[in-house]
Image (cartoon, grey):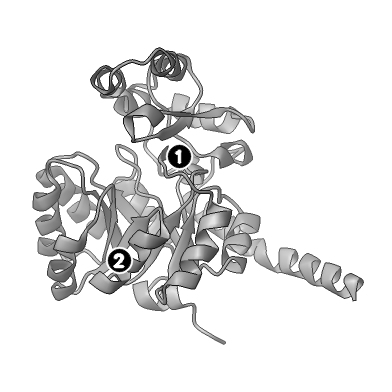
Amino acid sequence: MQVNKLCELLHIKYPIIQGGMAWISEANLASAVSNAGGLGVIAAGNAEPEWVRSEIKKAQRLTDKPLGVNIMLLSPHAAEVAQVICDEKVDVVITGAGNPGSYINMWREAGIRVVPVVPSVALAKRLEQKGADALICEGMEAGGHIGSLTTMALVPQIVDAVSLPVIAAGGIADSRGFLAALALGATGVQIGTRFLVADECNIHPNYKNKVIKARDRDTVITGTSTGHPIRTLKNKLAREFLRLEKEGASTEDLHKLGEGKLRLAVKEGDMDYGSPMAGQIAALVCKQESVKEIIEDIVGGVPEILSNVMEVIEWEK
C-alpha cells in the first residue's frame, strides 16, 4: 500500500490539517486533532509570544503526536513567535499573511517542517525555491482572510506548478470535499469551519449555534476595499461594514470598526456585533461532535463514495 506523502512528511495518520484560526485554535483543540490522527495547529494570530509558548507547552502535555503552529507574518510579534517555535521544538510551522522566506532557513535548521499558505501560483513557485516542505492552497470559499481564486480553480494550477505536496483548503468539510481535493491533485486537506463546532473547541456556544444554523448563502465577504477581505457569517456588524465600504469609508475607519470583533464573537458570543468567521461550507456543518468523530466521519465515508464513483464509471462503459 502506497504511503500518503503528506502523512509521511508530517508523521500523521490522516492527511487532515486543522486550520489555524486566531482566538480559536488553541491547545485543547489542537491536541485533540493530533490525538485523532490529524495535525493539530495552534494559531498565534496577534498574540504575545509568551501566550504562544504557553499554549505549545500545554498542547505538548496533552499529546505526544506532531503539532503545528500557525504564524501570521503581519503580526507585530512575528519575529519573536518565529523564535518561540524553534525554542519549543514545534513539529510544523504554517505561515500566512506574508512571505516567510526570511525565516525558512532558521526553521529548517531547527528540524521544523515549513508549510506556507499560498493564494497564487507565483508565490507557490517562489516558496518552493526558498525551501518550503509543502504548501497549503486556500481558496476563497474559506472562512477568515481569503484570496480571490476558488479552491477548484487554484489547487490543480498549483499542483501542476510545483513538485511539493499540496494541501487543499477552503470549502472542505466532509468525505466528498476530501476526495474532491485529492482528485484535484492535493495530497491532503486543511479544515477549519467544521472544527468550530467540535466538543473540544472552546468558542462560545452562540458561535457554534450560528455555524450549525447557517444556510448556503449565510456568509459574506467584508473588507475587500482594504485589501484584506474576510469571509464571515452575516450579522449586523457585517451589514454595517458593507454599508461603510459602499459609502467609501477610509481603510482606517474600517479597521477601527473591525478591531477586536473576532474576539467578541469567540469569547463573549456576540453574534450581532462580533465577527463569527466561517467558510461557505458552514451550511454542511449540522451538529456538534467530538474531534475524533469528525475525523472518523470524513475518512470513514471515503469507501462508499469511491464505490459510487466506480458504479458511474462502469455504467458509462
Q: Which residue is mark 2?
A: 126
Q: Residue 96: give x, y in percent of width and height.
A: 30, 51
Q: Is residue 203 visible?
A: yes
Instruction: Determine the residue positioned at 91% across, 71% down.
Output: 315
Instruction: Determine the residue positioned at 56% across, 59% down.
Output: 296
Q: Residue 53: give x, y in percent of width and height.
A: 14, 51
Instruction: Determine the residue positioned at 45% across, 47% down.
Output: 192
- Circle nearer the N terminus (2, 1): 2
Q: Quadrant of the C terminus?
A: bottom right
Instruction: Determine the residue positioned at 49% across, 82% down.
Output: 3
Label annotation for residue 143 = 1
Q: Secondary structure at mark 1?
A: loop
In the rendered structure, the answer to whether residue 245 lies left or right of residue 174 reads left
The 10 Å Cα crowd at callout 2, few under 14, some 14 to 19, many 20 or more, is some
Q: Residue 54: give x, y in percent of width and height.
A: 15, 48
Q: Quadrant of the N terminus?
A: bottom right
The foreground one among 238 and 224 is: 224
Amino acid type for the residue under numbered disc 2: Arg
The foreground one among 232 and 129 is: 129
Mark in the foreground, 2 or 1? 2
The foreground one among 81 and 230 is: 230
Relative height, residue 310 to residue 300 (above, below): below
